[in-house]
Image (tube, rainbow, N blue to C red):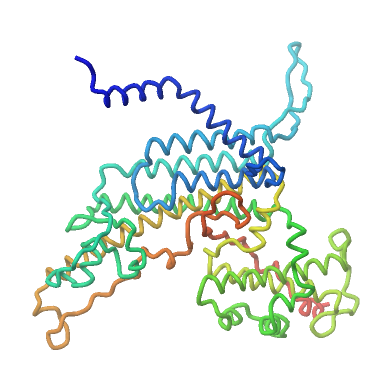
């Protein structure tokens, strides 16, 4: 009996796909490397970005294609899993050729020992790249573990709430497909749902364990990313764009507080408008710019400060500080203020300096580590956010059931009125979390951009690292 034409056609396509699959992969690899070599300039006119930025954009865009913003806790699709593993292997193979020479000892057949120089991956890649690969595998294994779960997702629709249900409007937001009132502006996102009695104790415990593990992964990725960014050179284009003095960077009000006799970072932050992420990031950019303006002036006046140590102040410090030490003094205070700001807002997006470092960075190894750790930050944060969403729905469902089990006349309210339940802030809204979005591609990227940025880790600042020159002068 002859095959159906449609079935025969699909069967032939599948056979051809299996037969020519290696050839298809080779063509895909050629296409990827062609874009990297062209610097994302398909015209071939040599106007593309440098290799480091092209690789950074390739990793960022690949992660956006595979993971998106991860609105569901579920295993990755096999096609996307294969795509991520395959193309990341292609991109990371560049790091195999970034090596350094290290001495090693080899034994001669006759018993002698001689030293030779052998190649090894560069120190930063040797330490951080295996760690990032381990974090990558751990995150994917966490996603793979969400099989046969006690929760599911439903695409929201136009659902009319039943006023007779528990909680009225609250019940409609939890059990009828609308996750929370705080997510009304994102009604199109899939909503997690649980059984009427909520999650079992074992399921909830597993979720909390996954969240704790993901949180540790997030901290590790943040630490690697912050360390790599701190080691990148400050581009001259950023320094050239800075104002001539720190006062012009900060404005009169912030400058007066920093230059005052009594300085408290906490009191100054209370006076600033930190009501939105945009304002906070703008203030961080201004403070960071002032730090580098004063540090640059200090280096110009004292080019050999690190080489020769000053035995005494020589009576030059009077009042605030002499002009020779004033720049260093103000830079220290600005650094202290910036550190306090980042402690209050640990999820602050990348600053202008960070984006300039990524844009003008020429080191391919640093570019690989920065972009890889950044997308791991994003993935880890999104997994944590989805777990928080699910735990919120579970708490809301169990609280609703607890209220429904209480008699209407025995609720303990004044005059027999029902007691309103206190609802904790919903983690559904991305704006109420430390991170605004998932992936951060700098604005200079020539590829399709994905907005947002994960937060930066805060480098430790010891109390002894800040010394007031006036205090030193009094003790001398």
Name the residue rendered at 64%, 63% in the picture: 352
Q: Residue furthest front?
A: 5
- Is 202 situated left or right of 216 in this image? left
Q: Please say whether residue 124 is visible from this viewpoint.
A: no
Q: Nearer the viewer, residue 332 or 84?
A: 84
228 lies above or below 162: above
Quadrant the C terminus occupies: bottom right
9 lies above or below 224: above
- Is 51 situated left or right of 323 in this image? left
240 lies above or below 246: above
Q: Position of residue 33 (x, y in %)?
A: 61, 35
Q: Nearer the viewer, residue 270 or 240?
A: 240
- Is 451 situated left or right of 115 in this image? left
Q: Nearer the viewer, residue 54 or 107?
A: 54
Q: Position of residue 265 (x, y in %)?
A: 62, 77
Q: Please say whether residue 430 is visible from this viewpoint.
A: yes
Q: Please give the count of numbered marks on the rendered protein.
A: 0
Q: Position of residue 240 (x, y in %)?
A: 78, 64
85 lies above or below 60: above
Q: Nearer the viewer, residue 305 or 68?
A: 68
Q: Position of residue 167 (x, y in %)?
A: 19, 72
Image-quadrant location for residue 260: bottom right
Q: Residue furthest bottom?
A: 415
């Amino acid at each position: 009996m002859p095959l159906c034409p449609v079935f025969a056609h699909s069967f032939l396509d599948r056979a051809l796909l299996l037969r020519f699959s290696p050839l298809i992969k080779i063509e895909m690899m050629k296409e990827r490397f062609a874009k990297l070599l062209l610097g994302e300039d398909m015209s071939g006119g040599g106007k593309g970005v440098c290799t480091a930025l092209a690789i950074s954009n390739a990793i960022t865009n690949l992660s956006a294609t595979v993971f998106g913003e991860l609105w569901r806790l579920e295993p990755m699709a096999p096609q996307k899993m294969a795509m991520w593993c395959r193309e990341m292997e292609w991109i990371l193979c560049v790091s195999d050729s970034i090596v350094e020479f290290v001495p090693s000892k080899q034994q001669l057949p006759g018993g002698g020992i001689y030293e030779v120089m052998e190649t090894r991956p560069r120190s930063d890649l040797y330490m951080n790249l295996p760690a990032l690969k381990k974090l990558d595998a751990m995150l994917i294994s966490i996603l793979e573990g969400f099989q046969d779960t006690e929760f599911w997702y439903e695409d929201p629709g136009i659902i009319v709430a039943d006023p007779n249900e528990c909680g009225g409007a609250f019940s409609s937001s939890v059990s009828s497909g609308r996750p929370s009132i705080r997510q009304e502006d994102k009604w199109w996102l899939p909503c997690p749902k649980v059984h009427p009695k909520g999650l079992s104790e074992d399921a909830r415990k597993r979720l909390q364990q996954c969240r704790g593990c993901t949180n540790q992964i997030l901290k590790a990725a943040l630490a690697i990313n912050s360390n790599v960014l701190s080691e990148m050179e400050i581009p001259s284009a950023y320094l050239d764009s800075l104002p001539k003095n720190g006062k012009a960077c900060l404005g009169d009000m912030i400058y007066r507080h920093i230059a005052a006799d009594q300085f408290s970072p906490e009191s100054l932050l209370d006076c600033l408008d930190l009501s939105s992420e945009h304002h906070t990031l703008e203030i961080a950019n201004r403070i960071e710019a002032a730090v580098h303006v004063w540090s640059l002036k200090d280096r110009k006046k004292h080019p050999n400060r690190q080489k020769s140590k000053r035995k005494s102040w020589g009576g030059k410090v009077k009042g605030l500080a002499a002009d020779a030490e004033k720049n260093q003094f103000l830079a220290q205070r600005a650094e202290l203020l910036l550190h306090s700001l980042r402690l209050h807002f640990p999820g602050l997006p990348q600053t202008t300096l960070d984006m300039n470092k990524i844009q003008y960075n020429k080191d391919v190894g640093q570019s690989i580590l920065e972009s890889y750790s950044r997308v791991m930050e994003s993935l880890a944060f999104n997994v944590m956010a989805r777990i928080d969403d699910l735990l919120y729905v579970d708490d809301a469902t169990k609280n609703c059931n607890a209220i429904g089990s209480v008699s209407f006349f025995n609720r303990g309210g004044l005059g027999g009125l029902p007691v309103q339940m206190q609802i904790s802030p919903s983690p559904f809204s991305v704006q109420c979390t430390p991170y605004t979005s998932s992936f951060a591609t700098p604005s200079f990227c020539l590829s399709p951009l994905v907005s947002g940025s994960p937060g930066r880790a805060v480098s430790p600042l010891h109390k002894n690292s800040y010394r007031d020159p006036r205090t030193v002068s009094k003790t001398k």
